[in-house]
Image: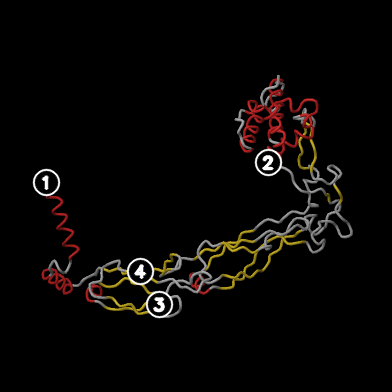
Amino acid sequence: MKADYYETLGVARSADEKELKSAFRKLAMQFHPDKNPGDADAEHRFKEIGEAYETLKDPQKRAAYDRFGHAAFENGGMNGGGGFTGAGGFADIFEDIFGEMMGGGRQRRSGGRERGADLRYNMEITLEEAYTGKTAQIRVPTSITCDECSGSGAKIGTQPVTCSTCSGSGRVRAAQGFFSIERTCPTCHGRGQIIKDPCAKCSGQGRITEERALSVNIPAGIEDGTRIRLTGEGEAGLRGGPAGDLYIFLSLKPHEFFQRDGADLYCKVPISMTTAALGGQFEVATLDGTQTRVKIPDGTQNAKQFRLKGKGMPVLRQPAMGDLYIQIAIETPQNLNKRQRELLEEFERMSSQDNSPQSSGFFARMKDFFEGLSE
C-alpha cells in the first residue's frame, strides 16, 4: 500500500507551494542516489519523494488526490499519477528545484551572444565642483565591438555554425540511473554555435580592448558616494551581444574650510577671547565666490553657531539652497608677556560671578553635590 504523499514529504495537507518545494529539496538531497551509492532503500525513498512532489505540485492532480487518494491515478486516471519514472518528467522536476546547482537552470540559446560586463570608474571631485557642477572628460579602458567581424567573432566571409553536440540548443541531457538531467553543452558552453574560423583581430571574441574617451555630466549639488550610470558604455557584449553599463562612483575631496552635511555646510572659525567678550565682526568666504560679514555679539560663548541662510550647497535638481553654519571656536591667549599677564590677573581679581555665570554655577552645584555625599 502506497504511503500518503503528504506524509512522504512530511508536510501538512494545508502546505502551500513554497512549503512543498522546501520539503522536497531537503529530502531529495538527503536520499539522492549519489549520496547513498548502492543503497536500494534510499533509492526507493528517493523515488517516492519525487512521485509525491510531482503530484502535489500540480493543482489539478493535488485536488484529485485530496478527493480520491491514490485511486485517482489508477487505471490511467490523471495520466497515471506520478508518471515521472521516465527521463522527462522527473528530470524536469529535479532541474526546477536544483537548477542553480546544475549550472543555473534553463538558459535560452542566443546564438552565442552574451551581454557585456558592467564597469566601474572611481572619480574624485572637489567641493567647489560639486557646488557648480561640471562636465568631466574621462578615459576608460574597455572592450568594444570588433570592427573587422562586426562582433560576430567569425573570420570575414564565414559564419558561426550550429553545435553538433547539442544541435544548437545549448543544452545536453546526461543519464544518471533512472532519470536524466540537462546540463550546459560542454562543447559550445550553452551558446548553441561554434566558430570554426575565428576572426584574427579579436580571436573569435567579437570584441577588442581599447581606451575610450567619455563625457560625464556632474550635476550641481551632487553628493559624496553618488553613483552615475551610463547605459551601454560598459564592455561590449560577446559576439555581438548587448553592451554592459558603466557606473561612475563619485567621492568628494576633503575641503580645507568646509564640512558638508547634505545641502548644509559647516565652517569652524577661531576668534580671540577678547572678540568673544567684547563683540566684533569678521568676513567669511562662501562657495558662490562672495564674502559674507558675520557679526559677533559681546559675550559670545564657545561653539556658538551663526546661520547664513542660502549660503550652503545647491539641492540636487531643485532650485533650493542649503545653509552655511559658522561655528565659533574661542582661542585662549598664548605666549603672554608680563604686562598682558598682569592685566589678566587684574581682570580676574575684578571679575564677579556675573561675568562667568556658567562657571560659577557649575562649581556651586558641584560643591553641593559633594556636601550631600558626605552627610
Count neighbours of disc 4 (C-alpha within 10 A) and say few if under 14, some if 14 to 19, many if 20 or more. some
Q: Is residue 295 above or below residue 73?
A: below
- State if disc 2 and disc 4 touch (CB < 8 Å): no
Q: Earlier in the sequence, mark 3 or mark 4?
A: 4
Query: Which residue carries the number 4 mark?
Result: 268
Count neighbours of disc 2 (C-alpha within 10 A) and say few if under 14, some if 14 to 19, many if 20 or more. few
The N terminus sits in image quarter:
top right
Alpha-carbon span between mark 4 and mark 1: 43 Å
Query: Which residue carries the number 1 mark?
Result: 374
Q: Earlier in the sequence, mark 2 or mark 3?
A: 2
Q: Amino acid at mark 3?
A: Ala
Q: Earlier in the sequence, mark 4 or mark 1?
A: 4
Alpha-carbon span between mark 1 and mark 3: 55 Å
Callout in the foreground (4, 1): 1
Alpha-carbon span between mark 2 and mark 3: 60 Å
Hey, which quadrant is residue 323 in on the image?
bottom left
Q: Earlier in the sequence, mark 4 or mark 2?
A: 2
| Residue 357 locus on image (x, y percent) | 17, 65
Q: Camera-side residue: 39 or 159? A: 39
Q: Amino acid at mark 1?
A: Ser
Count neighbours of disc 1 (C-alpha within 10 A) and say few if under 14, some if 14 to 19, many if 20 or more. few
- SS for callout 1: helix
Query: Which residue carries the number 3 mark?
Result: 285
